[in-house]
Image: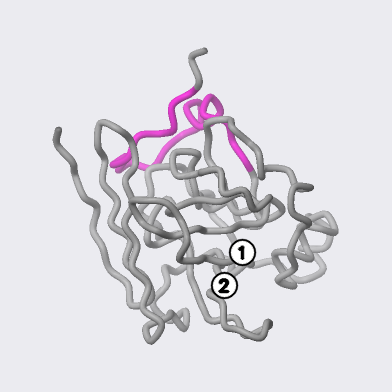
Amino acid sequence: MTCRASRISRRNALFLTATCAGGLVGISVFAEDSLSDGSQEPQANDFDVPFLVPEYSPKSKRELRRDLNSMQYRVTQEAGTETAFRNLYWNNKRKGLYRCVVCELPLFTSDTKFKSGTGWPSFYAPLSNQVVGVKKDWKMVFPRIEVHCARCKSHLGHVFDDGPAPTGKRFCMNSASFKFETAAEVEEAPVQQDRSQPAPQADTQ
């Protein structure tokens, strides 16, 4: 079996992704003293991912309130949290791609989604080291690591150190932060020129 590793770089997180026969393999390492302040995150539409990245211009609060429903706005713009087991994708078993609901940046695929038992959609790695940012969250009595979209800064959820192999990470996300595309819809859409990773495979059963 041969694997091809993508380039890796970032102060706040290291994600090593490889294309293998078995699908996406992810390794992530977080250092508490190297969490991103946002200065090294990709700008505008400069994202090296194998899926279509629609262009995006920042929206005003008024535009966001118009375009998002109340839960989507509360989660993405006010760092709210959905109710466990009562959200759209916690038990979604379909193959596909999870995009940011605000700017449509590809964030996660079904290849790294797993059953966490928490009632929220959980992943052991994002699509790329570029697409998410992290920062310390002191809203509770203990610090947590908040995860946001690297482009529009929308709140996605938190990441914890109790996930499965190969990363040991659990990206506990809010369904309201996502726009889901099935594998069939992904296959029909245009893609970036450098398609270094395969699209999620559609179910054949």
Q: Which residue is under mark 1?
A: 157
Seen at 58% across and 58% down, the residue is 172
Q: Position of residue 58 (x, y in %)?
A: 63, 67
Disc 2 crowd rating (10 Å Cα; few below 14, some 14-19, many 20+) is many
Does the magenta run of residues contain 78?
Answer: no
Front one among 110 and 180: 110
For marks 2 and 1, the one nearer the N-term is 2
Query: Looking at the picture, which amino acid does disc 1 mark?
Result: Gly
Q: Main secondary structure of the magenta part?
A: loop
Query: Looking at the picture, which amino acid does disc 2 mark?
Result: Glu
Q: Secondary structure at mark 2?
A: strand
* Mark linked to residue 71: none
Query: Alpha carbon of mark 2 to alpha carbon of mark 1: how far?
Result: 6 Å
Dividing the picture into quadrants, the one containing residue 179 is: top right
Q: Secondary structure at mark 1?
A: strand
The relative height of residue 142 versus residue 167 in the rendered view (above or below) is below
Q: Which residue is under mark 2?
A: 146
- Quadrant where the N terminus sits is top left
Front one among 44 and 90: 90
Disc 1 crowd rating (10 Å Cα; few below 14, some 14-19, many 20+) is many
Seen at 52% across and 12% down, the residue is 205
Does residue 139 appear left or right of residue 123 in this picture? right
Say whether marks 2 and 1 touch (CB < 8 Å): yes
Dividing the picture into quadrants, the one containing residue 182 is: top right
* Start-end of magenta stretch: 180-202
Q: Position of residue 148 (x, y in %)?
A: 56, 67
